[in-house]
Amino acid sequence: MLVVEKNALTEEIESLVQRFGKDRSSLLKILHEIQKTHRHIPDFAQQEIARLLDIHPVEVYSVITFYAFLNTEPKGRNLVRVCKTITCDLQGKDAVCKAIERELGCKFGESSKDNKFYLEYANCLGLCDMGPAMAVNERVYTNLTPEKAVEILNGVK
Amino acid sequence: MENKRKERKGAVLFTEYKAGKSIKKALSMKRDDILLEIKESKLRGRGGAGFPTSTKWMLTAAAIADEKFVICNADEGEPGTFKDRVLLMEYPDLVFDGMVIAGYIIGSSKGIVYLRGEYEYLLPSLNDYLENMRKDNYLGENICGKSGFNFDIEIHLGNGAYVCGEETALIESMEGHRGEARNRPPFPVTTGFMKKPTVVNNVETLACVTKIVEHGGAWYKEHGTDKSTGSKLFSISGDCAKPGVYELAWGTSIKELLEFVGAEKTKAVQVGGASGVCLNKTQFDRQLAYEDAATGGSIMIFNESRSMLHVLKNFMEFFVEESCGQCTPCRVGNIKLLEGVEMIESGEFTFSYINKLKDLGKTMQVASKCGLGQSSPNSFISILENFKDEILNNGNGGSNGK
């Protein structure tokens, strides 16, 4: 990481700590924001957050690894999460997933070659009455067919 | 997703309501009188556990502290449950008014909604709604002219962990820790968020309170059965013509419910989500109520074409992933149960081992630290018991037709 990048990240975290407060209860809010802007939480950010909240870096790491939405390694720019829980599964999730994998040329658990997408399975998205369902970043899409799912992903910038 | 509030029909929740009405009424009453109304209504927690709401609130109201908290548990992660999504999207007035009333009763000035990360798309509209409540003085200082009653609500986003629906894990998560359940006692009513007295209530429970304050506890009790008063929002999914969220009276039988949503050739009904129990045809006369087939609202319907072993495997994979790993019965037990399912799938099992696994499931029910591990063996035990012939006695050496 370049020094200028490090400095920028430190500044960003400092302003988040100022916004949410120095208390431990701000930790997840800060991690959420960093995850959102950087799509992962780099080592250096973990250390800086720990320093500014006055906790051990291992504490930060242990929290990150607990939650499904937080990760320490970079992923593709757009996060595609297909629900794999039973109702979506029975409504044809497999066909949707296969179509997505064919179209993007990568498997679930991987980023696409152009780094535009990262594919993963999600546990129940709470859209069981409109399955199969998937989320692309924060937006959700319901009643998918293989064709519709691919069309949606092709429309993502 | 479209807003269907105008089309929804029900006896208690899906009825007309003018935002703020119950707040004004509550503020003109004494705190104890409102608690008595809620006690009279016999309202029980709608998240699934069914703890009496009035008891929880009385304990918190009686606790002495400089600060107390009202937490709305919107970490709706149970497979097959989506009623809170509908309530928050279409009936935020009922939910937030209920939080303000709770704040007034227990003497709190801060409400927090723990919204599951998967529902982040609801956040802008909820924040807009809260902003309007502030403008109308339903939130803020001296609410509706009641001097000294200040209350505000903020929304805390979850980060994708099913176990955080358990109230002490939820509080841990809000304090910036891993979402691992705490030992109880002490209970959150005395030692909750930031070690302060805290009530944690399901979204639907809070909405019910708003209606109870509006119409009174006696009116509420007219609906449902003696032990399960009022109505319930059911999230119905799976093999039926009209999946969705419906308000039905407690005491409705499964048969009636199946007819209502147009389910045909039904083989199995999973009541209470992945952590609930799976019923077969002979049990469709059972009633949905706390005293019979209890549920937080999730109903999943499977027709005759479905493999119940496949369903069970999906559930067990879910629990293996979502177990927080803190206590051994749940961390190891769920993996062993999943391995058992895989053995049956490949035909490489013995009956004595499967029986041992059922015993292990019973051990998990008593030995696990929180509700996750205590309820995750439910589907394993009930599916293997109720669909024994299909899964174990199918004449293919148990290989389930493969």
Image (cartoon, rainbow, N blue to C red):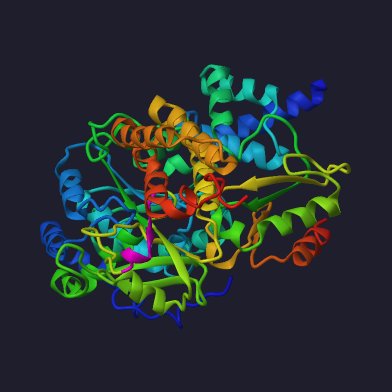
Q: Is residue B247 above or below residue A19?
A: below
On-image quarter of the C terminus of chain A: bottom right
Q: Position of residue B183 (x, y in %)?
A: 30, 29
- For the N terminus of chain A, give its image quadrant: top right
Q: Residue furthest bottom?
A: B7
Query: x%, y% of residue B42?
Result: 16, 61
Q: Residue furthest front?
A: B395
Count of picture labels: 0
> In this orientation, which residue lies closer to the viewer: A139 or B124?
A139
Going 31% across and 64% down the picture, which residue do you hit? B283
Q: Is residue B56 left or right of residue A1?
A: left
Residue B327 seen anywhere in this rendered image of the structure = no
Q: Nearer the viewer, residue B219 or A17?
A: B219
- Residue B112 in the magenta stretch? The answer is no
Q: Is residue B202 above or below residue A20?
A: below
Residue toward you, B349 or A4: B349
Q: Answer with the quarter of the image where residue B328 lies.
A: top left
In magenta, the rendered stretch is B275-284
Q: Is residue B276 magenta?
A: yes
Task: Classify residue B114 as left or right of residue B214.
Answer: right
Tell me if I can see residue B172 in this picture.
yes
Residue A24 position in % (x across, y down) = 47, 28
Question: What residue lies at 49% left-to-right and 61% top-to-bottom?
Answer: B126
Residue shown at the point (39%, 41%) measured from the top left? B377
Residue A26 on image: x %, y % = 50, 34
